[in-house]
């Protein structure tokens, strides 16, 4: 195993991961703020400073372990969740769905923007000196590729219909009140359900169709730009 190359790639992957999870959480907090809940703003979580959103386990330990164990082929991470007081929202049932959807939607947008930047990079690279391509363009290309794959995956993962994930909260908001109340009771056990699905491999079969749908949406929006995916 080439440890120097692995460490280099880990450092390159860290930048898009920090950007992705930071904007994911800001999107939740900002949407909640616009819909009547100032909790995230009052706690200083509507900032692009990633330090405010870093969780020692989810943002640092887990991504490093997964990256090393997969020999650089897989990385996943999470930020410290932005606090949202759903009762403060002007229309709690509708607005909680909007707040929850804001995070994955932001990741999809970030993936789309990363693809556009990668297209621009491919067009510029042939006109630059070899040393610039090797020292600047190649690392940027790798970072953008990490950004695309990570943002698509984290959007799909968060859309799993299990509370407290975003997909679970969206589904809770869409269900009739009585069924929503019963479904929301799963939230304290949601993380254990997700872990069980993950380690049994079942989660993959739920995430893959969501991921495929997200990629299809991105492809449609890329048509005017010549596409890339």
Image: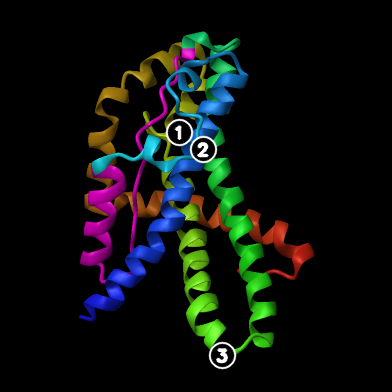
* Camera-side residue of 8 and 169: 8
Q: Is residue 227 above or below residue 138?
A: above
Q: Nearer the viewer, mark 2 or mark 1?
A: 2
Q: Quadrant of the C terminus?
A: bottom right
Which tag, 3 or 1, sits closer to the chain's start?
3
Task: Please give the count of numbered marks on the rendered protein.
Answer: 3
Q: Residue at x 52, y 70 (%)?
A: 140
Q: Is 56 included in the stretch rendered in magenta?
A: no
Going by the image, does 115 lie left or right of 71? right
Provide the secondary structure element on which disc 2 rests: helix
Q: Residue at x 45, y 25 (%)?
A: 44
Q: Residues within 10 Å of mark 1 (few under 14, many from 20)?
A: many
Between the C-alphas of marks 2 and 3, the distance is 39 Å
Q: What range is drawn magenta here?
A: 57-86
Q: Which residue is mark 1?
A: 166
Provide the secondary structure element on which disc 1 rests: helix
Q: Nearer the viewer, mark 2 or mark 3?
A: 3
Is any atom of residue 228 visible in this view? Answer: no
Q: Which residue is mark 2?
A: 103
Residues at marks 2 and 1 touching, judged by CB atoms closer than 8 Å: yes
* Camera-side residue of 76 and 143: 143
Q: Quadrant of the N terminus?
A: bottom left
Q: Is residue 78 above or below residue 220?
A: above
Outermost residue on the bottom side: it is 130
Which tag, 2 or 1, sits closer to the chain's start?
2
Q: Nearer the viewer, mark 3 or mark 1?
A: 3
Q: Which residue is mark 3?
A: 130
Between the C-alphas of marks 2 and 1, the distance is 8 Å
Is any atom of residue 157 visible in this view? Answer: yes
């Amino acid at each position: 195993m080439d440890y120097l190359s692995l460490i280099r790639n880990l450092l390159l992957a860290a930048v898009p991961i920090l950007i992705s999870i930071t904007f994911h959480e800001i999107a939740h907090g900002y949407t909640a703020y616009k819909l009547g809940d100032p909790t995230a703003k009052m706690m200083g979580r509507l900032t692009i400073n990633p330090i405010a959103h870093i969780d020692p386990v989810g943002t640092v330990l887990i991504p490093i372990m997964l990256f090393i164990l997969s020999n650089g082929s897989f990385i996943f991470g999470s930020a410290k969740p932005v606090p949202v007081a759903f009762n403060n929202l002007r229309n709690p049932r509708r607005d909680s769905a909007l707040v929850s959807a804001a995070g994955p939607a932001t990741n999809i947008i970030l993936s789309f923007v990363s693809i556009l930047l990668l297209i621009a990079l491919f067009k510029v690279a042939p006109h630059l000196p070899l040393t610039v391509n090797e020292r600047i363009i190649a690392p940027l290309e790798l970072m953008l590729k990490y950004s695309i794959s990570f943002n698509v995956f984290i959007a799909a993962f968060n859309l799993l219909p299990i509370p407290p994930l975003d997909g679970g909260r969206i589904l809770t908001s869409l269900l009739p009140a009585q069924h929503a109340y019963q479904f929301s009771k799963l939230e304290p056990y949601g993380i254990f359900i997700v872990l069980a699905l993950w380690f049994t491999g079942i989660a993959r079969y739920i995430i893959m169709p969501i991921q495929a749908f997200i990629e299809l949406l991105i492809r449609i929006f890329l048509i005017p730009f010549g596409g890339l995916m």
